[in-house]
Image (cartoon, rainbow, N blue to C red):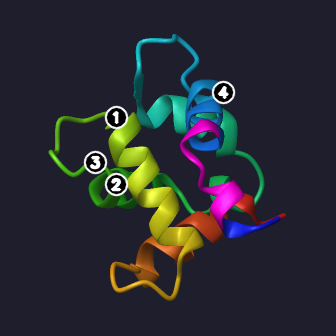
Amino acid sequence: MEKTLLVSTENLRAAFNMIDANGDGELTKDELKAVFGGGHVSQRGEQVWDDIMKEVDHNSDGVITIEEFESAMRQIVNKQSSVYNPSLATRASLLTAE
């Protein structure tokens, strides 16, 4: 899939809404865990979730907004950009590893 399509606002918002179980427009650590918490990640413990929240939750309010989510996902997909964050990409790869 082409990177620009993958990180389109429409696709990122659809992904965000799928994770946002209660529909309040914010992602909590528990919502992330409910979607991505199986397999590899569950073996790594609570620190993985704390690290993800710390890196993605820019204003440190304990939730991830759509803007924070879009920013983080674009950083991961656009590895070559100047805002690439290798530690965030590593954590995101853990979420999708089997």
Q: Residue at image x 76%, y 67%? A: 2
* 28 relative to 36, above or below: above
Tag 4: amino acid: Met
The residue carrying mark 2 is 56
Position of residue 26 measured from the top left corner of the image (x, y, whole percent): 38, 25
Q: Which residue is mark 4?
A: 18
Residue 3 lies, in percent from the top left, at: 68, 68
Q: Badge 1 local density, few (<14 within 10 Å), some, or many (20+)?
A: many
Q: Residue at the location (51% across, 12% down)?
A: 23
Say what secondary structure mark 2 lies in. helix
* Total number of numbered discs in the rendering: 4
> Would you say 78 lies left or right of 87 here?
right
Q: Which mark is residue 33?
A: none
Identify residue type, mark 2. Answer: Val
Q: State if disc 2 and disc 3 touch (CB < 8 Å).
A: yes
Instruction: Characterize the local packing of mark 2: few (<14), some (14-19) or many (20 or more) Cα atoms within 10 angstroms.
Output: many
Instruction: Please state the horizontal and vertical placement of residue 76, each as a whole percent of the image.
Output: 53, 70
Distance CA(mark 3)–CA(mark 4)? 18 Å
| Residues rendered magenta in the picture | 4-10
* Quarter occupied by the N terminus: bottom right
Mark 2 or mark 4, which has the lower sequence index? 4
Q: Earlier in the sequence, mark 3 or mark 1?
A: 3
Mark 1 vs 4, N-terminal side: 4
Three-letter code for the amino acid on which mark 3 is drawn: Asp
* Mark sitting on residue 57: 3
State how far apart marks 3 and 2 are (Cα). 4 Å
Residue beneath label 1, please?
65
